[in-house]
Image (spheres, rainbow, N blue to C red):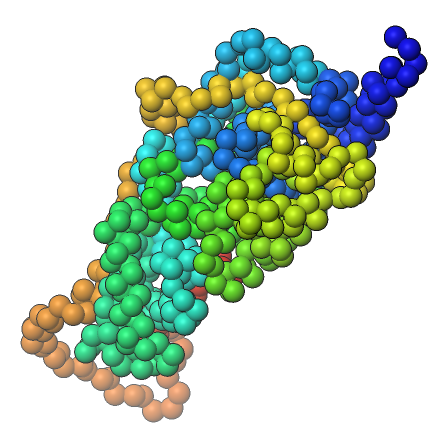
Amino acid sequence: MTAAESTPSVRVDAVAARIAAAYATTGPALELGAVVHGGTPHPGAPVRVPLAMLNRHGLVAGATGTGKTKTLQLMAEQLAAAGVPVVVADVKGDLSGLAQAGPAGDKVAARAAQTGDAWTPTSAPVEFLALGGLGAGVPVRATVTDFGPVLLSKVLDLNATQESSLGLVFHYADEAGLPLLDLKDLRSVLTWLTSDEGKGDLKGLGGLAPATAGVILRELIALEDLGGDSFFGEPAWEPADLLRTAPDGRGVITAVELAAVQDRPALFSTFLMWLLAELFEELPEVGDLDRPKLVFFFDEAHLLFSGASKAFLEAVTQTVRLIRSKGIGVFFVTQNPTDVPSAVLGQLGNRVQHALRTFTPEDAKALRRTVSTFPRTADYDLEELLTSLGTGEAAVTVLSERGAPTPVAWTLLRAPRSLMAPLDPAVLEAAVAGSPLAARYGEPVDRESAYERLAARLAPAAPAAPRREEPVEVPDAPAGRRPHSREADQDLVGQVLGSAAFRAFARSAASALGREVTRGLFGTRRRRR
């Protein structure tokens, strides 16, 4: 071979080595794959993401069938192995295979050789959850008051005026000491406010028109008819149960099974945001860590932002911006980066971009916008690359250990070590039944709340029994000052504690304490520990 003939291969190797050098780390990292240049993968040129940078958030995007789910699986199992808990939204049921070691095969062996991966079949510790028990998983529930008016407005598809009005209803319930635990509680409060008995309270709210209350009430009934009420109730989910590690020190992967509620996209996307909001409100500030406390994969992210109000988008943006300092990393997973608002997209420092399709003029425009968000590179024609990537390939750019964006790397991604298919239903059912959380969250609880209290108000009062008045003897006061005695003090205290005035005061104070509800960015309740 002449020198001229050998030049191209030398140049390719040098470029791959230069790109890989920007991904070198001194601390722990996720191994994504190997640099591809000139159409050839270079197993000695690894592409990796520093664990310390995963709380800078990220984006996994690409058209259907390009390998996004496998990328999630690859990252989740490595995070778990590093002791980091993970939450993944399993919309299609594909990620349940994380709990079982993957089978060896020729394709896996070839991918391992191309990416420099010493592949071994490995399972991960997985906890399966399901919204309200709809599907295979430990039931996850939230009370209506914990969920808050902003998130519930997104589920009900309310406009800005209706969302504001719903906030007033929550405020009224908080002040009136009416616990909103499930949808029938909220429906009963709205029914009360639009009734003859409660119209005085409605006037006191000022900004809530009877017609608007009627619209909200109808939307609630429609949500109940679709089965959405199964998610709201008790026992309410505790965010701390997402931050668990297995006895061997690996992080627990919480897979939220959403296949059974695919026909209610607003509910499951908003539920994921509620989980994130709960973590934001509950966790303390920790600053920068050598590895995140938890990484959250937000699948089908376009559903979260579609039709969202300005207040909702502002709350999402602020949550993503601030939750980094609490050690939480968030990865949005969607088909096209343009699905994510610019204010949120600008905070996603780690990008794994699978292939994009350009079937329409809108697709072509989205492609150009996507290319403009990547660092400039002379190594690839990005517009051509993003439309020609194969399955399991991606254009990657992440934040290096010093916080600077890495150059774009055409990456052949590693194969996951767990099963790249859904678990057998019988195996999944056994895993759910054996969960340590099943005993705590398995059975619903229905305690006294707004529904029962308002029903009691409307119930006819029982006739009071005639009260017999006992004569009270008042001893004659002796001349001069009465002698002071301990028995006299005790008698006086007993009279005060037993007086109607004191009992009324005690009831008022207890009600005030019960009504004290502090709400966060989404109107979710901040729990007092």
Residue 241 x/y as whole percent: 48, 38
Residue 382 x/y as whole percent: 70, 39
Q: Is residue 165 left or right of residue 51?
A: left
Residue sitting farthest toward the bottom: 479
Residue sitting farthest toward the right: 3
Q: Is residue 397 left or right of residue 359?
A: right
Q: Is residue 60 left or right of residue 400?
A: left
Rendered view: 113 above or below 468: above
Q: Is residue 440 visible?
A: no
At 60% from the left edge and 50% from the top edge, which residue is drawn?
365
Rendered view: 121 above or below 519: above
Camera-nearest residue between 68 and 254: 68
At 50% from the left edge and 31% from the top edge, which residue is drawn?
65
**How many numbered dots are placed on residues in this image?**
0
Q: Is residue 175 left or right of residue 306?
A: left
Quadrant in which residue 400 is drawn: top right
Quadrant (top left/top right/bottom left/bottom right) for the N terminus: top right
Residue 386 x/y as whole percent: 64, 37
Camera-nearest residue between 517 and 422: 422
Q: Is residue 471 visible?
A: yes
Residue 482 x/y as whole percent: 37, 84
At 52% from the left edge and 19% from the top edge, which residue is drawn?
418
Rendered view: 207 above or below 455: below
At 12% from the left edge and 79% from the top edge, which residue is drawn?
469
Camera-nearest residue between 135 and 183: 135
